[in-house]
Image (cartoon, rainbow, N blue to C red):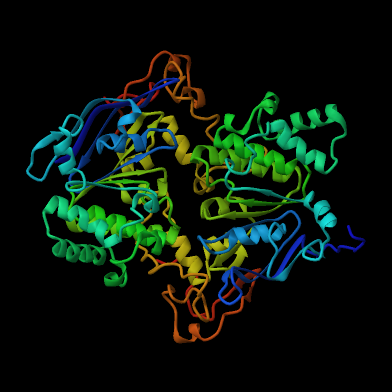
Amino acid sequence: MNRLDVRGLSTSFDTDEGLIRAVADVSFTIRAGKTTAIVGESGSGKSVTSLTLMRLLPRTANTQVSGQALFVNRAGQALDLLTLPEPRMRAIRGDEMAMIFQEPMTSLNPVFTIGEQIAESLRLHKGLDGAAARAQALRMLELVEIPAATQRVREYPHQLSGGMRQRVMIAQAMACDPTLLIADEPTTALDVTIQAQILALMRRLQAETGMSILFITHNLGVVAHHADDVAVMYAGRIVEAAPVKDLFARPQHPYTRGLLACLPSQQRKRPPAADGKRRLYAIRGQVSSPLAPPPGCAFEPRCDKAIAACRDAMPALRRDDAGGSARCILVPEAA
Amino acid sequence: MNGAAVSAATPLIEVKRLQKFFGPAARPVRAVDDVSFTIQRGETLGLVGESGSGKSTIGRALLRLIDSTSGSVSYRGEDLASASGSRMRALRRKLQMIFQDPYASLNPKMRVRDILGEALHVHGLAKGKGATARRITELLQLVGLPPEHAARYPHEFSGGQRQRIGVARALSVEPEFIVADEPLSALDVSIQSQVVNLLCDLREQFSLTMLFISHDLDVVEYLCDRVVVLYLGRVMEIAPTAELFARPLHPYTQALLAASPKPDPLVESVHVPLKGDIPSPVDPPSGCVFRTRCPHAIDACAQTRPEPRDMGGGRVKACIRDDIQAGAAP
């Protein structure tokens, strides 16, 4: 069963300089109890995708959204998140669907204790009274392995370390037992030993609750170990999607291949250049401005394999032979 | 160079028992506490550690951008702490820095040609407008930017291009030694590898000696000859890069390597994450600072501070236990 089925999602911003298509024709699914990762670099549209799904884009952003995002709730009903009336969306957000962000310091409220912040959603969504909500908040802190939780529950965000704050964010997100957790770069601001703790925690909670996770990240190492399915985004579009093992074993799109080859840890697998020098593979150039996208494939100006036909039209995302799909005219279509 | 003869054996940079405390003397933040290492001519030394390990503070103290509390930093045998203001200005031509955030380290009100020209002017390296313009063109080409970009302001560039300008600025004075403080961490993966290649090329072309500060172990493994591993302001381990990554000796190095996820789903990651948080540098644990999170800690670890010991083969370890199996933690 798919927890979330996104079809043809597009998000554009009408700016003074012109229309920016931040997310264009994005389709992917998240299976029940599984993790789908969206990987991409700055400006690829991965965060706008998650904010569109949560309907958290600011009203002032002159947003144009189209497509469908079918979310299957606990009762088994399929709801289109993009057209749901705002009061119903508000009832789902923080309850069945929860989100954690990259920067726990800026996403926690500095003037409320962490206990109050966790209790808020319990009062709102579960109708608990003050005392019951506070008791449950304490249990949530224990669930996310915060030491001395009885004392911490009365502390403010600034009194905690970065790793502890991210645990609080997770406790808050988990408070109403969500079926879908959207995690937008949840470990990017953390040190590597703390990142390992948070990832282990998320994994444990997923195993215990059966929730689905949408994991937004730029870190391919994290993707390799914590995703079941992966979608790679470039300039607002999914350029490749596949189960995680297929993606790493047989990347099809030149951008995915480039991203993996760029990693210094892949260097040992590469022979030295003709002059004997060791060089990292590099994707040349930089992402085109969203105001002046190239005429055909968005990656064409940086692609080593590009041919003249790449400039004619944006390729479609087609099934390939490697178990996934790719948006490249040079990747053979599945038979 | 100050008249002192520098023998071949003298390291280019020698850091001895460096300490840097911030805040009130009664209860200071012990950012760097008794750190010693050397950097040989032509060598790239990696400085690795998590937040609060003191790696950036060491980088700044090395160029005397901040004054150290005690200990010494010497360049070609000359103690930088006792160098006069004018002597230090002259030395800065030889000792340069590339900063982490290319958005914050370039003056937004200056055009690229003025940013680069200022460094040339201060050190009297190009006489007259014509020579300065020629040198700026040369520098931009060196870092892979078109010469006409000299007339632009920093905000007109992407992050990767800005970091190239930062590199050009550091190179403009023909330095011998560069401290690169997390020069890649603000950049996207595809841009990172471009800058890594640029640093490698320039290092070779100008025989640069480098201190490369980073939390990215993969880049350090690729770029550095030797690595110093820091934790909470102290040295945990020093080793040649290949040996460190193949057989980490210190429990902290082992945990750090195991915690870094490998970009390959087939490599099983079954390691047990370190418990707890990095302690506060205001109130570091007694004895070994890592003992509160160390899976191998014993009572003796709390008693005395482990001194960095020579383990042979250019390896140094600050851990009292020699009965721990080398290699990354399972």
Observer-nearest of B31 and B320: B31
Residue at the image position 70 percent from the left and 55 percent from the top: B43
Q: Is residue A91 left or right of residue A235?
A: left
Above-or-below relation of A75 to A12: below
The spot of residue A234 in percent (x, y) is 40, 31
Q: Quadrant of the C terminus of chain A?
A: top left
**Residue B275 position by quadrant:** bottom left
Q: Quadrant of the N terminus of chain A?
A: top left
Residue at the image position 54 percent from the left and 43 percent from the top: A270
Above-or-below relation of A232 to B285: above
In the rendered image, the residue lying farthest to the right is B3
Q: Is residue A244 left or right of residue B307?
A: left
**Residue B125 position by quadrant:** top right
Can the viewer see residue A276 in this picture?
no
**Residue A256 position by quadrant:** top left
Above-or-below relation of A227 to A297: below
Q: Is residue B21 left or right of residue B74?
A: left
The spot of residue B146 in percent (x, y) is 67, 26
Above-or-below relation of A151 to A218: below
Can the viewer see residue B249 in this picture?
yes
